Amino acid sequence: MKKFMILAALLVATFSMRAEVKMAGIFTDNMVLQQQTQAKLWGWADAGKTVKVKVSWDAKAKYSTKVAEDGKWCIEVVTPQAGGPYTIEVSETNKITLNDVLIGEVWVCSGQSNMEMPIRGFNNQPIEGAVQAIMEAGNYADRIRAITIGRSFTEEKQNDITGGKWEKSGVETTPNMSALAYFFGKNIANALQVPVGLVITDWGGTDIECWMSRETYTHSMQNVRTQEQIEKRLAYESSNKKHPSRVACLYNAMIAPIAGYAAKGFVWYQGCNNAKHCYTYYDKMQQAMVQQWRSEWGDMDNKMPFLYVLIAPHAYHRDPMGERRPFFVLNQMNAAVITPNSAYAVTETLGAGSCIHPPKKIEIADQLAHHALIGTYGKDTGMKEAPIVKSCILKGRTYEVEYHTSVCPAYADLEEVKGFEVAGADRVFYPAKAKVNYRTVIVEVPAEVAEPQSLRYAFRNVPDCNLTNRYGFPAPPFRTDDWEKVAEK
């Protein structure tokens, strides 16, 4: 009897030690899977065991795989056209059932505080249109779903996220969702009439270096910074141990664990934290980060769209007339030149000046959705991109600035275009009068400038400017000179 009891105890202990099949934290009820693709599902179980998957949208499909030696398993399931709700069953010794799964369009949304800023806003910092968005949120329960990845930063690459679950749009959940991500998703859901899934992974006050691997950062800086500068940045850690600052620390904890979750593309709003020191090479870091993300999502052909936001007007160093921001914005714009399938939203007339977090997230999301609809989904909306300078010619005492699209002042009752400045050899800029003629802006050289040497538009931290296209998309800064940036105060 005693031997029998010992044997029974051993059997119980052995059974209890067996690891049940587990799914990665990003897979929960209410999630959205990318339509018409091979979507990866993954998790962990005992090595050598067989994991099976059933999907309710295809009862005939049978998926199974053996668990690898490291305990990880991964299965790709073929997803149909947008629809649902569906269920997914994952089984080995136990069974996991994911309910209310939708199929649609998935976008990964990342960045710092302007991506993080929720519909409810921050203290003393509101989001325009928040009340209406919250009141209507229930109408989008089956069209907008979001997961906000739990905050964590580490020195080593992690296998799983620390928290977060998929939630339906609703009056109690939407206020806490990223405003920019939500408004972007709402635009896509309305335009395509499909469910939209938003994977939100952000952290305010963080550098772009935190969001890529150490190897990617080092490679991107090889021809830009000295080895000493690279090593110094790799070793940097702020005195605030509770806030991420090291290279790769957010990539390790909040990107790597979700890499491969089938998605259409990426939305990025970051840069304010980098504007102070890398206005000549931020574009190289963004290009490298995008390439790494695409690669880890299985996109070796740079097809996944990367949509991002140019940082908004803000009085850096409490200096609205400074030039720190426009120099950085020009570098951000160049990232689209060197990175395939990327596009940006302009914020020149959408900033709040004294506040680094613009309340006009709807207008920014409109531009991002415009790029997605035209560039990603092939929809001819008839809308045009933000006005970009095509040519600039000085004729006597007049500059003729031609844009690729028609332009107009931001307000219909204003005829004067604001934001242009002209300087002579002394590099002192004076406001210039300007007016619109379809695609061309005629700029008069101010009387204070004897021999004009440079024309600039919106080239201040907080510019007084109003040039947009007919849909209200702002024109970005530009300059005709190649003068070096004025030293920061």
Image (cartoon, rainbow, N blue to C red):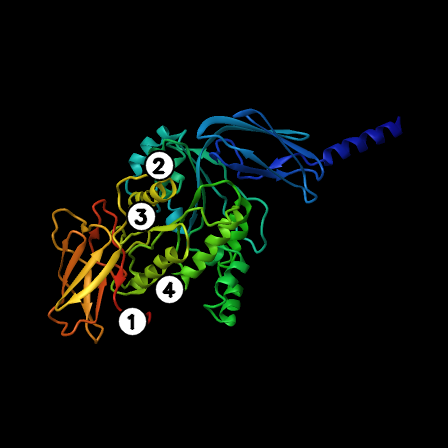
Quadrant in which the C terminus is drawn = bottom left
Of circles 3 and 2, which is in front? Answer: 2
Mark 4 surroundings: few (<14), some (14-19) or many (≥20) residues within 10 A: many
Give whichever of discs 1 and 3 has the lower sequence position.
3
From this view, report whether residue 303 is shown above or below residue 446.
Answer: above
Mark with earlier residue (4, 2): 2
Mark 1, residues whose alpha carbon is within 10 Å: few (<14), some, or many (≥20)? few
Q: Position of residue 437 (x, y in %)?
A: 14, 53
Circle 2 residues within 10 Å: few <14, some 14–19, many ≥20: many
Residue 199 appears anywhere in the view: yes
- Residue 467 in percent (x, y) is at 20, 53
- What residue sits 40% from the left and 29% below the top? 141
| Nearer-N-terminus badge (3/2) | 3
Q: Which residue is mark 2?
A: 186
Say which of 215 and 273 sits in front.
215
Residues at discs 3 and 4 in contact (Cβ within 8 Å): no
Q: CA distance from mark 3 to mark 4?
A: 30 Å
**What whole-number distance in Å separates the C-alpha atoms at marks 3 and 2?**
25 Å
Residue reaching furthest to the top = 59
| Residue at numbered disc 1 | 483
Q: Which residue is under mark 4?
A: 279
Residue lying furthest bottom: 426
Q: Amino acid at mark 2?
A: Lys
Q: Earlier in the sequence, mark 3 or mark 4?
A: 3
Query: Which residue does the numbered mark 3 point to in the structure image?
Result: 124
Instruction: Compare residues 213 and 398 and report the one nearer the observer.
Output: 398
Per the model, the C-alpha gap separating discs 1 and 3 is 38 Å
| Image position of 433 with respect to 65: above or below | below
